[in-house]
Amino acid sequence: MLYELEELLNKLKYNKESDHLIFVGDLVAKGSHSLEVVRHVHDLGASCVRGNHDDKVLKWKRYFRLLEEDGLDLNEHIQRGWLPKDLEVNSEHETLAR
C-alpha cells in the first residue's frame, strides 16, 4: 500500500542517508499499487526478505520465461494440465508477473 508506506516513512522521519529499512516480505499482492511499492522500496535502497506472495509472483515470472524460451502457449499448458499446481490462473500474482 504505497500511500500508507509513504505516510509511515514520513511519520518515522525516515532519512535515506542515515536509516536502512528491512522489509519482511509480501511487498506485492497485499494491497494497492504493488508495482509502485516495489519500485519505491528499491529506490529507498532497502533490504527485503521474500514473502510467500513475492515468491508466487517470481514463480509466475520464471514460468512465463520458460514458456517464451520454449515457444509454448500458456492456454495450451492449462488445457493439457501442465500448469504447475502452485500457480493460480487469473490471480493477482499472475497479473503482476506479466
Image (cartoon, rainbow, N blue to C red):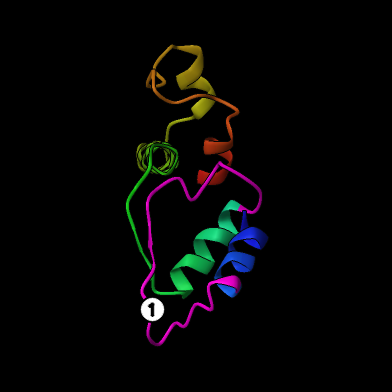
Q: Main secondary structure of the magenta part?
A: loop
Q: In the rendered structure, which amino acid carries the disc numbered 1? A: Asp
Q: Position of residue 39 (x, y in %)?
A: 52, 65
Figure quadrant of residue 91: top right
Above-or-below relation of 15 to 30 = below
Residue 54 in magenta? Answer: no
97 or 82, nearer to the observer: 97
Residue furthest bottom as drawn: 17
Q: Position of residue 25 (x, y in %)?
A: 40, 48
Tag 1 secondary structure: loop
Residue 19 in magenta? Answer: yes
Above-or-below relation of 91 to 66 = above
Q: Position of residue 49 (x, y in %)?
A: 32, 52
Above-or-below relation of 70 to 11 = above
Asked if residue 3 lies left or right of residue 89, the reply is right
Residue furthest front as drawn: 12
Q: Quadrant of the C terminus?
A: top right
* Residue corresponding to mark 1: 19
Regarding residue 98, the answer to whether it shows in the image is no
Q: Position of residue 20 (x, y in %)?
A: 36, 74
94 or 77, nearer to the observer: 94
Query: Which contiguous range is marked in magenta?
Result: 11-33
Residue furthest top as drawn: 80
Label 1 neighbour load within 10 Å: few <14, some 14-19, many 20+? few
